[in-house]
Amino acid sequence: MTRIFKSAALAATGLALGAAPAMAQSLDEKVNEVFANSTGWFVNFIFSPFPGTSFPWIVMWLVIAATVFTLYFGFVQFRTFGHAIRLVRGDYSDPNDAGEVSHFQALATALSGTVGLGNIAGVAVAVGIGGPGATFWMILAGLLGMASKFTECTLGVKYRNEYDDGTVSGGPMYYMTKGFAERGLPAGKFLAVLFAIFCILGAFGGGNMFQANQAHAQLTNVIGDYPGWITGVIFAIIVFLVIVGGLKSIASVTEKVVPFMGVMYVAAALVILLMNVDKIGWAFGQIFAGAFTGAGVAGGMVGALIQGFKRAAFSNEAGVGSAAIAHSAVKTKEPITEGFVSLLEPFIDTVVICTMTALVIIITGQLIQDPATGLYLLDEGATTIQTVDGNKGVALTSAAFSSAFGWFQYVLALAVILFAFSTMISWSYYGLKAWTYLFGEGKTTELVFKVIFCLFVVIGAAASLGPVIDFSDAAIFAMAVVNIVALYFLMPIVRGEMDSYLSRLRSGQIRKFKN
Amino acid sequence: MPQKIVVGFDGSESANRALDFAVDRAKAQGGSVLLVHVLEWSPYSFLTPTELEERHKRRSEELARAQSAIIDPVLSRLGDAGVMVEGAVKYGHIAEVLAASAKDAGANQIVIGRTGHSGMASRLFGSVAGSLAQAAPVPVTIVP
């Protein structure tokens, strides 16, 4: 009798397994359809162009803000670059504060939240659509973005909440409420609530679904096609163990491996560039030519510019407000010092790492050019440039690196997964801060957020790239809309702090502890 | 000039031998002892956002625990030894902190216990005694 049961059970399992792939594929499609339909209006609003042009207003918004901050603070990103590095090295840290969060640690943690798929997949998307010229605008946006980051992180530290038990909470929500109250401005609370809502959406989007999606793309690229929800469920379980189960070991291993991976990624890119040293001049030529003429690129020069600016903002998150949350735990008597340190973040993230990715893609000839005219060939829909094997997103980067070292695709797969994971952990924290700001702190409210966060991991891995990337961008840029309004109102405070600090630094009142 | 001796103290047996040695010296010369316990810490390590948030709180807890578990028992044991003994808990690289403490306190000597590590581990990571020998501003005594 038992034997019959057993064989029946086995047969049933076999049937279920056989039916699974078909069901899974349709499940992925279903998720994709529902997702695209339900978020489309939001995406359309955020990326709606200026009337009569094809230029999305949001991109202009970010670039104008970064330019305003750059001018208002007198090119702070160039003037204090050296001082920022000395701060990170700990030259100005009081030895008696050893054991507290150092500038280096705050920067490293913030970086591991931003260095991620934006640098690998996002850049590939940018040059895939906007051509090499997108790189130029990306670098420019990165340099300008340093001033935005400086502004928001200074405010993040200045207006953080320090609780009796010694923990801290900081971020745009706090400078919006406290900073606005201090300046006698209305609507601080309203902005803070709005920001918190978008921050939660951003945490689910760019900080989660985009990561899961591209991690899955990378996995299928290496080990063959299989349904996305499987990756999603596995990722969701690990994330759940870390953020709900408090499994610190996974998180701390990731935190240690990610910087190592980042260094290795840049090193590999440098080696590839050195191997093609004769083509570097040509690549920069392509970048400059593409930046201003946009020859043969979908949307021409404006297309290159939009792609470059978009991906830079998405990668380094300058002006978005997320970094203000990450940087706020540092131990310092001068909030402005964390601002100086944070301006290194877009530099490392965008000007160094993103540029490496772009150069490697260009130099290894992944973008197909017309041999006769040198123009890039567009695919059938005339929306993206034709690539070798039709790769896009993370697969394009992977193909570029693998063309030099075949084995690198495995390293990259591991890097992508780890970057994705560390970005998810960071964003789960940012989202949680916004969530508890709205709904109050408490075990149950926190758990609700964390469970929803894990569900979105599955959705992100199952949906296809287009809708996910659109929604991710839209949510993160929506944060920037609110955050930058607040930054405009609060920037005189930062200016005051900066002038006071720099004059004390010049007069020798602020001294190094180390020589 | 009265002798002041810095003792690197981690509560181990050899550290206790170093302490006894230092107390004897101080007693003979009418000096005092500064007990320094170092919590290994690098400002260049990597932490998660949650760890950053809780760092200040954890630091206070770690300092309190080290004080009550390692420093206080010694201070009460040596309360009637006839020598002034102070204790301090600090964060950082052990050898660097001991050297800096000796300098700040104007000590004339550093005493540490021999850890007895040899071979691979100390080749790779260096030993406290080895680093101190190179960095210390005052004479160093290693008690076996």
Image: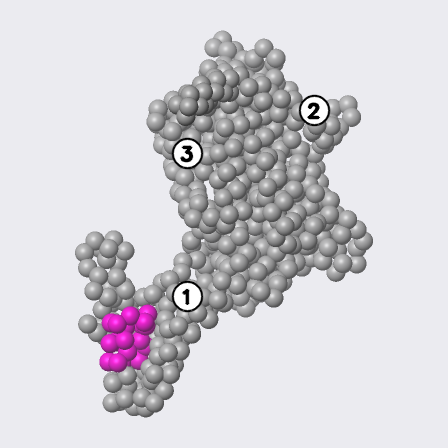
- B127 relative position to A44: left or right: left
Is residue B111 located in the magenta-colored stretch of the structure?
Answer: no
Is label 3 in a helix, a strand or a loop? helix
Give the residues drawn in magenta, as a range. Answer: B5-22
Is label 1 in a helix, a strand or a loop? strand
> What residue did someone put label 3 on?
A414
Q: Mark 2 vs mark 3: which is more N-terminal?
A: 2
Viewer-side label of 2, 3: 2
Is the residue marked by circle 3 packed among few (<14), some (14-19), or many (20+) residues within 10 Å? some
Q: Position of residue A331 (x, y in %)?
A: 53, 61
Amino acid type of the residue tagged 3 in the rendering: Leu
Count every numbered label the image shows and give the total: 3
Q: In the image, is residue A344 above or below residue B130?
A: above
Q: If the image is split into quadrants, where does the C terminus of chain A sit?
A: bottom left
Instruction: Mark 2 and mark 3 in contact? Answer it, CB < 8 Å.
Output: no
How far is disc 1 from disc 2 in space, using C-alphas? 55 Å
> What residue did someone put label 2 on?
A37
